[in-house]
Image (cartoon, rainbow, N blue to C red):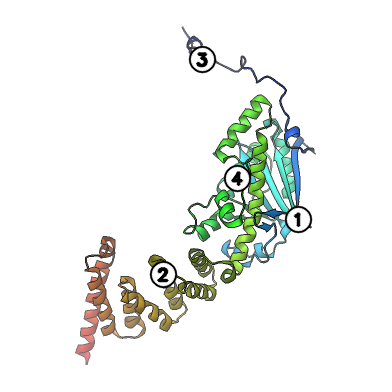
Amino acid sequence: MVTLSERLKALGVQVGGQNLTKPKGRPHSIKEIVPGESQETPFGEAYVVNQFFASDYLHGQNPLAFPKSLDRLAAWARDARIAALKPGNFLFLDTETSGMATGSGTYAFLVGLGRFEDGGFRQMQFFLRDPIEEPAMISALEHIAAPAEALVTFNGKSFDIPLLKARYLTNAAPQPFGTLLHVDLLHLARRLWRDMLPSRALGDLEVNLLGVTRSGQEIPGWMIPQIYMDYLFTGDARPLASVFYHNSMDVLSMASLLEHMADKLADPMERSEHHSERYAIGRLLADIGFAEEAIEIFESTLKLKLPADVQFQLVENLACLFRQRGNYESALHLWEKAAADGHVYAHVEIAKYYEHKASNPNQALVYTMAAIEVIKKRNTPTFERVHWGPLLEYRRERLERKVNRRATAH
C-alpha cells in the first residue's frame, strides 16, 4: 500500500527537514547585531539588551517624563491606588511574538520593559535566542517585575498579558503580572481620539500627537513573526535589528503617551484645542465624576466654530449635566434653542420639565404637539419617526387625559 509520504515524494514535495540547507556564509549572531548580555537564572541564561535614556532625551517633541498628576487617569481606571504610586512603580511592557494569536502555540520571543529611574528611563529587552531559553526568560522577567505595582501597556489586556500568562502556565511557573494594577492606554486612546483621528494605532498616535517619526529601521508588526522564524532557521540575526527597534519605540511611546494623556486630563482647558478632543475629555470627566469641569469644557467648546452635528451633541450633553445637577433654568435655555432648531428630543425634555417639575401639563402638551408636527415633516429621518412617533402619541394621550381631569375638577 502506497503511503501518503511516498505519494508526496512522487509529486516532488519535500517531506521533513533533513535535506534542507541553510544559506551559505557565516551567520551573524544576535550579540553582533544587538549587543546585550547573558543574565544567569536558575534555569540557564537569558539574553538581555539594556538601554538608558537620560532625562534630556527627546522622544518626538518632548523629553520622556512622568506625569505631574495621575488623579484623573486613576479615576478613569476606577482605581485610586494608581494616583498614589511613584514613577518607579510603573512597568511599561510590550511583546513581540511568534504569531498573532494568544493560544498555547504562540510565545513571546522578545519582551520589552521600561521603567522611570532617577535621571531618566531604563529599557530592558529580553530575547529568546532559542525557544529552549524560555524558562530562563520568564524567570528573569519575574525578577524584574517583582518591585513593580502597576503595568502600562497598549492593548496588553487583550493580547500581551493573556499570552504571557499562558507561557508561565505552560512552564508551570507563578506568573508575576496577575496582581499588578493595569493601565491599558489603547482603551483610553479610543475614548479621547475616536472622532479626531482616523486610527488609534500606536504608530499613528506617535505621529499625530507626540511628533515621533520612526526611522527607516521600522517594520510593520505583521512581518515580525516571520523574521523570527527565519532567524531560528538561518541563525542570521541581522533582520532582527528592526524588530528590536520596533519594540523599543513601542515602549518609549507608551511612556510618552502616558504623560500626554494624563496631562490633558489634568488640564484640558490649557492642553486641548481641537473641539472633538475637548468634547471627548468633557464626556469622560462627566462619566468619572467631574461634572463641574465637564460643564466648563462643554461651555467653552460651544464658543468654537463647530460642525452642526458636534454642536447638537454638545448641547444635548451639556443640558443633561445641568439637569442632573438640578439646574433646570440652564437646561431649559439649551433645550429651547435646540427645539427651535427642530430637534425632537429637546421638545420632549421641555415637555417632561413642564409636566413633572413645573406641574404645567398644558404647556407640556403644547411641546408634545409641537414635537409631533416636527416628525411629520418630509425631511425627518425615518428612524426618528419610528422611534419618536409611538412615544409621542402615548405622551399626547396621557397629557390630554391629565388636562381634561384638571379642567373637570375646576
Of the numbered discs 1 and 3, the one sitting upstream in the chain is: 3
Position of residue 341 relative to residue 197, above or below, is below
Q: Which disc number belongs to residue 71?
A: none
Q: Which mark is residue 13?
A: 3
State the SS at label 3: loop
- Who's the residue at 41% across and 69% down the image? 311
- Mark 2 element type: helix
Instruction: Identify the amino acid type marked 3.
Output: Val
What amino acid does circle 4 point to? Asp
- Which residue is label 4 attached to? 160
- The CA distance from mark 1 to mark 4 is 25 Å
Q: Is residue 188 left or right of residue 36?
A: left
Label 2 close to label 1 by CB (< 8 Å) = no
User: Which quadrant, please, contains the C terminus?
Assistant: bottom left
- The residue indicated by pointer 1 is 120
Residue 74 seen in render: no
Q: Quadrant of residue 163?
A: top right
Q: Circle 4: is it few (<14), some (14-19), or many (20+) Cα within 10 Å?
A: many
Spatial CA distance of label 1 from label 3 is 55 Å
* Observer able to see residue 57: yes
Of callouts 2 and 3, the N-terminal one: 3
